[in-house]
Each structure stands twice: as C-alpha cells, then as structure tokens.
Amino acid sequence: MTLINMQFYANTLQQTAIISVILPEPRSSDQVSLTATEWPYMILLHGLGMNQSDIIRKTSIERYATATQMAIILPSLGRSCYLDSPSFPAWQFLTTELMPRVTATFKLSTNLADCFIAGISMGGYGALRWGLIEPKRFRGIGVISGAVNYFNW
C-alpha cells in the first residue's frame, strides 16, 4: 500500500490544498508502477472536526483499499460542510479542481463503473449532495452516519 500526502496551490481556494491518496498494494508484477494501472477509486470525505489523516489513522481504510484494489482519494476541507462560502469555496474546489489535479498525477479509471463517492457525517452530506447532483459521475454513493439535514444552515 502506498500513502501519498499531497499539498498544492488550489486556484479555487486561493490557498494550499491538502489531500491524501492511498494506492492499493499491487496484486501482480505488471501493476507495480504507480501509473501502470488505471485504478478504480473512491473519494472519501471526512466529517466535521476531522481531516483526512483521521480516517487513515483511525480506520482500516488502507487494508480495504488493498482488498478491493481501489485507490482512495481523501481531501481535507476543514469545517466547510463541503459548501461554498465567500471566503472558502469548498464545493467549487471539490467538484471542479480536485479530480483534474489527482488524475493528472495518478492514473485513475474514467469508467463510471470504477468511480465511487463516500463520506462520514458531514462528509456523508457532501458525498450524497455530489452524487445526486452528478449521478452519471459515480457508480455508487456511501453515507456513513450522514449529517444530511443541512437545509437550516
């Protein structure tokens, strides 16, 4: 399993973005290169009061990535609720800038059958929102203890 922590300047956020990417342990020798395989992937969104490293440290996500042969993309977007605000356009970053940056760096599948979105708590809300707004972008949506009643915010 390969864990890559990336920092890059995000034009939409006008600040440094932090993401982690987990690439599964290859099962065959022709998968050894980071770019030799088009990995199926899941974008996994953290909850309120968490960041991407909490998911890595406190779950078995690395083991699941290897078992499923799926890359895991873990953006860190603070307490944004994955919504835009005047000072922090988290939704715009998530939906327009994140994946072009990640796919330019790693060879991820573009096949709908290989693309998933999931989230924990606040991240469950973000995953559900993105998956329902763009239903042809993901094969499945995962919501874990989702905080999905945000209409009063």
Image (cartoon, rainbow, N blue to C red):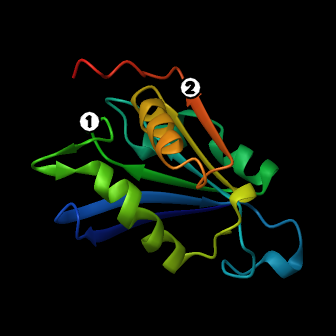
Q: Residues within 10 Å of mark 1 (few under 14, many from 20)?
A: some
Disc number at residue 79?
1
| 33, 77: nearer the viewer | 77
Q: CA distance from mark 1 to mark 2?
A: 17 Å
- Image point (62%, 51%), residue name: 138
Q: Earlier in the sequence, mark 1 or mark 2?
A: 1
| 4, 102: nearer the viewer | 102
Q: Position of residue 33 (x, y in %)?
A: 72, 81
**Amino acid of disc 2:** Ile
Q: Are the residues flagged by discs 1 and 2 in contact, CB closer than 8 Å? A: no
Disc number at residue 61?
none
Quarter of the figure with the N terminus: bottom right
Quarter of the figure with the C terminus: top left
Disc number at residue 144?
2
**Amino acid of disc 1:** Arg
Is residue 104 shown above or below 133? Answer: below
Residue most extreme to the right = 28
Q: Residues within 10 Å of mark 2 (few under 14, many from 20)?
A: some
